[in-house]
Amino acid sequence: MATYSDELPPFPEGWYFIGHRKSIERAKLIEKTWMGEEIVAWADEDGRICVADAFCPHLGSHMGPTTGGLVRDGCLVCPFHGFEFDTTGQCVATPNAPPPKAARLKLYETREILGMIFAWWGSGGRAPQWHLPDEPPTGAEWTGLRSTILRFRGHPQETTENSVDVEHLEYTHGYHDVKPTDFSVDGAYLKSCFDFKAVRRILGLVDIHSEVSVITHVHGVGYSFVEIHETTVGIKSRMWVLTTPVDGEFVELTMVNQVREVRKPGRFISGLGFLPVPLRHRLLNVFILREERRFVLQDIVIWDRKRYRSPPRLCRTDGPIGKYRRHCRQFYPEPAMAPRSPDRHAD
């Protein structure tokens, strides 16, 4: 069976999601396969997060919790010989001898946005070539973050291509009057904006006819921040769409959502109007994320079985897919990583 790696290298450079700070602190130590690597992540007593290669530099033991690795006094402790590593990656103690200075973990540079932890993966271990944006403004008017994770065969360049593929919004998801309003690229950053109309059922009770404006901010291919304004009711929400390669075949797509409180909605929302404002919007956040998950599941049916086509045979209504693919070439810096053949475009 052909896979994405037949024509798209599996691991584009960029910043990719690790997990939520709260989840890491709750678990004390997590392990996962990430970008084809076995990694661990933990927080020390001062809240510093460390993302590191899972294998001990001493004799190579895996240090994840499934093999007995643990965190003690903010340090990662190897289950094989008890070597201890702090969040700088340095071995700081062993049971029976001074810690060897050469014993250091391989670390990944991290960035935190609203409690979401990201790490940089560079080709050949390259340092970060660009950075994620600043945190968006937040406050009491925004609900807490709510997230859901989907795992499937795919590639982050393909999933992120949806941000510019406006034609599929109507054909696959049933939106109406989809109109692109802006598209631009600047280095690793891409901006894609469009308006559309849709019909959504709230609580299974009432159909809401919506007019929606969307601004999508894409950094690399693993980080998309989507600002959504439903102008009919007056709902503002934002969603992070974070696609992270697991092993070269599967990806994890994490959707994280937040809703801004609407004190005076433009239209009464049946079943929610009598609730206290904070509870109303927490529930609305749940419903919006559930609805967006439903839309992504429609895409996954296609992503899971599709093959990457290069060059694609585009038509005039396909929008800036060709420009998007040219933009993505920068994330494959080595010749061996580059997509096999140039794309031909109808843009």
Image (cartoon, rainbow, N blue to C red):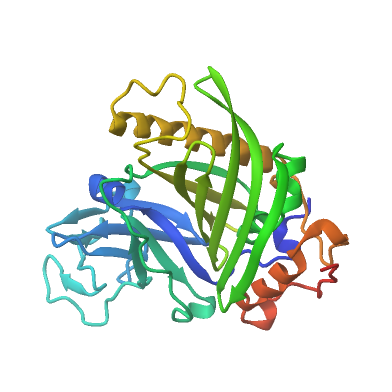
Residue 159 figure quarter: bottom right
Q: Residue at x 42, y 53 (%)?
A: 32
Between 283 and 300, the residue placed more toward the observer is 283
How far across and how far down the image is residue 11, in percent? 59, 66
Between 291 and 237, the residue placed more toward the observer is 237
How far across and how far down the image is residue 252, in percent? 53, 49
Q: Residue at x 33, y 59 (%)?
A: 137
Q: Is residue 11 visible?
A: no
Q: Residue at x 48, y 42 (%)?
A: 149
Q: Is residue 340 left or right of residue 251?
A: right
Q: Is residue 274 left or right of residue 197?
A: left
How far across and how far down the image is residue 18, in percent? 40, 57
Looking at the image, is 318 positioned above or below residue 262? below
Residue 278 figure quarter: top left
Q: Is residue 157 left or right of residue 246?
A: right
Looking at the image, is 273 positioned above or below residue 111? above
How far across and how far down the image is residue 6, in percent? 75, 63
Looking at the image, is 302 positioned above or below residue 119? above
Q: Is residue 77 visible?
A: yes
Q: Residue at x 35, y 29 (%)?
A: 280
Residue 232 figure quarter: top right
Q: Is residue 5 left or right of residue 252?
A: right
Screen quadrant of the C terminus: bottom right
Between 75 and 337, the residue placed more toward the observer is 337
Between 229 and 104, the residue placed more toward the observer is 229
